[in-house]
Amino acid sequence: MNGSGMANTNLSAAKKAKKDEFYTQLGDINAELRHYAHHFEGKVVFCNCDDPYESNFFKYFAANFNALKLKRLIATCYAGSPIAGQQLELDFGDCATLTASPSEIWSYRTSSPADPLFGRDERPAHPKIPHKIVINEVTDANGDGRIDLADVEWLIRNGRNVLTKLKGDGDFRSKECVELLKESDIVVTNPPFSLFREYVAQLVQYNKKFLIIGNLNAMHYKEIFSLFRDNRMWLGASIHSGDRKFTVPDTYSLDAAGCGIDDNGQRFIRVKGVRWFTNLDYKKRHDEFIYIRKYQPADYPRYENLDAIDVSESKAIPEDWDGLMGVPDTFLDIYNPDQFEIVGLGAGDLAKEIGVTKNFRGRTDVALKINGKDKCPYSRIIIRRKK
Ligand SMILES: C[S@@+](CC[C@H](N)C(=O)[O-])C[C@H]1O[C@@H](n2cnc3c(N)ncnc32)[C@H](O)[C@@H]1O
């Protein structure tokens, strides 16, 4: 298996084991967020799967609070988040607005009970105490020219900003987190992969704007695909190929190719198929798709069980075919809603809805006959050109 395949296997294993601790790189966040600056003025941003001491989402918005003209930034930390080690150095002791005691904020296994906050070489015995941080004001930076944990500590020394212990476990579905969601305008995070479907459903239920990172495979879920079809969600601007690096806790094994330990001693894995999912519009989404092919019957076989042609690569969409076409999932990377309409999926219940009949396997997946042999192409989205 090649490196990317192994990274995908790693991700599936993580999903099964509910290993959700993949931390997004600041560079990836910067590269995406620069396409949306105009959406944020006067808005309340909520990072609801984010320990402010670890999350680069929180750090990004704290650092750009004034530049984006944010009204408020809220982050909530889930009980399950293990910590990455460096946070053990932090002392919350003299934060005026801290409503949980320092010893409540972090629980440590330590051989030295007299020094519970600075057990430097110890791993946490328990998950973190779930908490929220609310940033209403960011005044002068502390002047060291970089974003680090000291900045978070410094932010909560400002009397208008508050660090508070949550009543529950910080689950994004909990009542108190849903209340925070209701008062927010835009949710930006990397939610737990194992709960992606549920996570998106909640955003839709509360009619929120969002920009979240996940895996392209999620589009196969019926509920997620329907949002793409109805132009209520689309892929973001910056990631359309390759893999992305995520840091992981020390407890994660690094047995896949492409994983490793960086210069700071931080473990990381590389994951293929990563994409941003959003309902915030951006300019590049309307870039015209330039056709390079014309329809030739020999190049575009017709499906046996749907009146449509098969287009094996999105870049080969013919400019002169007006009917339905089946294209690979990566069509979503070039999808311009001004030029194309997403009609449905080429497999499963959604395929049935658009008239795909049972194939040689007795399933409603689009099927082809190539040189007399029955074949189902891997995953197709059914589209048509807009006139
Ligand atoms: C993929 S990680 C991303 C962390 C962070 N947002 C980032 O990108 O660096 C998902 C985070 O969601 C947290 N999480 C898991 N289940 C959760 C839940 N039910 N509610 C809220 N957060 C949860 C995990 O502890 C983990 O820190």
Image (cartoon, rainbow, N blue to C red):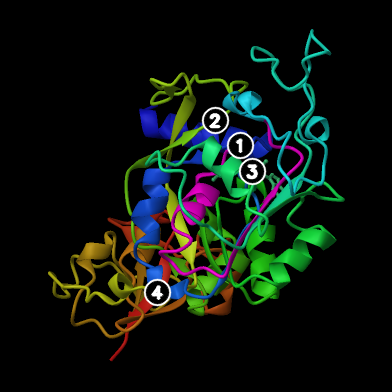
Around disc 3, counting alpha carbons within 10 Å, would you say few (fewer than 14), some (14 to 19), or many (20 or more)? many
* Numbered label attached to residue 38: 4
Q: Amino acid at mark 3?
A: Asp
- Residue 82 image offset from top left, x and y in percent: 68, 31
Identify the residue at image location x=58%, y=48%.
Answer: 155
Q: Earlier along the polypeptide chain: callout 1 or callout 2?
A: 1
**Circle nearer the viewer, 4 or 1:** 4
Q: Is residue 146 above or below residue 107?
A: below
- Residue 143 image offset from top left, x and y in percent: 41, 43
Residue projecting furthest to the top = 111
Report the Cα–Cα distance between label 4 and label 3: 26 Å
Which region shows up in magenta?
A: 54-82
* Numbered label attached to residue 248: 2
- For the question of whether residue 357 can be seen, the reply is no
Of residue 214 and residue 37, the one placed in the foreground of this image is: 37
Instruction: Determine which residue is flagged by label 1.
Output: 21
Look at the image and say whether residue 66 sits in the magenta stretch.
yes
Kindly indicate whether the residue at mark 4 contacts the one at mark 2 (C-beta within 8 angstroms): no
Look at the image and say whether residue 49 sits in the magenta stretch.
no
Q: Is residue 101 above or below residue 276?
A: above
